[in-house]
Every structure is written in structure tokens, then in C-alpha cells.
Amino acid sequence: MFKRLLIFCLGVSALALGIVLNTKTMLGVSSISSVPYVLSNFSPLSLGQATMAMYIIYVLSQVVLLKRLTVKMVLQIPFAFLFGLIVDLFDGLLQLTPTSFMWSLVYLVLAIVITAFGACLVVSMNLVLNPPDGIVNTIAFVSNQEFGRIKLIFDCSMVSLSLILSWVFSHRLIGFGLGTIASALFIGQLISFFNHYLASFFARVTNS
């Protein structure tokens, strides 16, 4: 159990680092962090606090849709607070500004790989659901649709909402760009890649 918890915490940290690094590329943020990123630009909330607020909304939405509160949902609340704090920690530490398009691409590739690796570790340890995955899983269950299809619709909805918010507040698009598209295309594939090559390791850890 200690190993699972340690790997889970490593995954949470990597996931937060990847999300923050994505915001530093100047090429657009990932779909899942698009709304918190826009909110942090037009409110007193930091990126971590805005992420925390969105994650709490996801948890409450699960309760409303399922009309019950489970232990797994409750555990997502401290996860949201912890994750928000780690996001703010990395956001303060990573004072990066790309000096060229090439460096932006380097940061983007690192962000995508680290985010996928972190998500893989978090999911594989099966301790606490990441609230965005929790709400997608709940919507898929209630609507009797495939998780992958709902995930795509959910991500597109978050990007659309972020574009609307940024246009309303500043009459320009914030946080959308090549990085948003690249994250949508490659993070899921990289998660599958890591799952495939680390499957035996994860099996040993979870069964020990």
C-alpha cells in the first residue's frame, strides 16, 4: 500500500507539473486546464485555486447526476485541494519564458509527456479518481455512453467554454493554440503507451 501511495503522489506531482509547464509554452494550454487558466487571468484566483474550484464543481456535479455521495467522491475533495496547492507551487517555481518558437515546442513536448506519465500513474494506482475523470466517468455511466466518446465531448466543451469566457472578458482568445490541439491529440496516446509498457510493473505494485 505504501508503494501505491508513493507512486500515486508521484503521479499527482507529475500531472500538476505537466499542466503548469503547458501554460508556460505560449502555445496554448491543455483542454482540461483551459477554463481554470482563463479564470486565473480575469479573477483574483491563482491557477491552482481556479483548478481547485473547477475540481470541486466536478465533484458536486457527480453527486447531482448520481443523486448520492460515495466515498470515492468524498476523497476527490482533498485531492482537489492538494492538486491545487501543487499546481500553485510549480507555477511559482517555473518562471519560464520561451525565447523562440523552438523552445516553445520543446516545453510543449515535455509538458505533454510529463502530463501523460502523471495521469498514467494516478489512474493505474486506482486510489482516488482525478475529478475531471470522475465527472466524465459519471456522465458516461448516466448517459450509457463510452468513456472515450464522453471524454472527447467533455474536453471540447471545456475548450469552448474557455474561449467564450476569454472573449467575454477580453474580446480575444486566451489559452488556445497549437498546444491545446497537440495535447488533445497526443496525451491520450501517450497514456496508452505508458500503460502498455508499465503494465507488469503496475500489476506487481497493486498486488503487493
Image (spheres, rainbow, N blue to C red):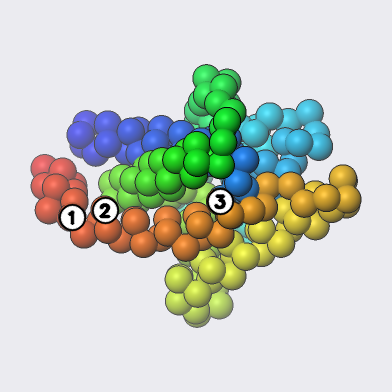
- Asked whether 67 or 143 is in front, the reply is 143
Pointer 2 residue: 194
* Label 1 vs label 3, nearer the camera: 3
Residue at the limit of the structure toward the bottom, as seen here: 144
- The residue labelled by disc 3 is 179
Up-down: is 47 above or below 105? Answer: above
- Cβ atoms under marks 1 and 3 closer than 8 Å: no
Q: Is residue 132 visible?
A: yes
Q: How dense is the environment of label 1, judged by Cα within 10 Å: few (below 14), some, or many (20 and up)?
A: few
Which residue reaches farthest top?
A: 93
Q: Secondary structure at mark 1?
A: helix
Label 3 with label 2: CB-CB less than 8 Å? no
**Horizontal and vertical percent for residue 119?**
39, 48
Looking at the image, which residue is at 34% across and 56% down? 190
The first of marks 1 and 3 along the sequence is 3
**Tally of marks:** 3
Element type at marker 2? helix
Return the mark for residue 197.
1
Residue 198 placement, left or right of 161: left
Say which of marks 3 and 2 sits in front.
Answer: 3
At a point 87% along the width and 45% down the height, the residue shown is 170
What's the distance in space between the residues labelled 1 and 3, CA to CA? 26 Å
Tell me: 73 left or right of 119: right
Three-letter amino acid code at disc 1?
Tyr
Position above or below: 151 against 126: below
User: Separation of disc 2 and disc 1 at Cα?
Assistant: 5 Å
Question: What distance separates the C-alpha of mark 3 from that of mark 2?
Answer: 21 Å
Task: Residue type at mark 2: give it.
Answer: Phe
Mark 3 neighbour class, 10 Å CA radius: few under 14, some 14 to 19, many 20 or more: many
**Tag 2 or tag 3, which sits nearer the N-term?**
3
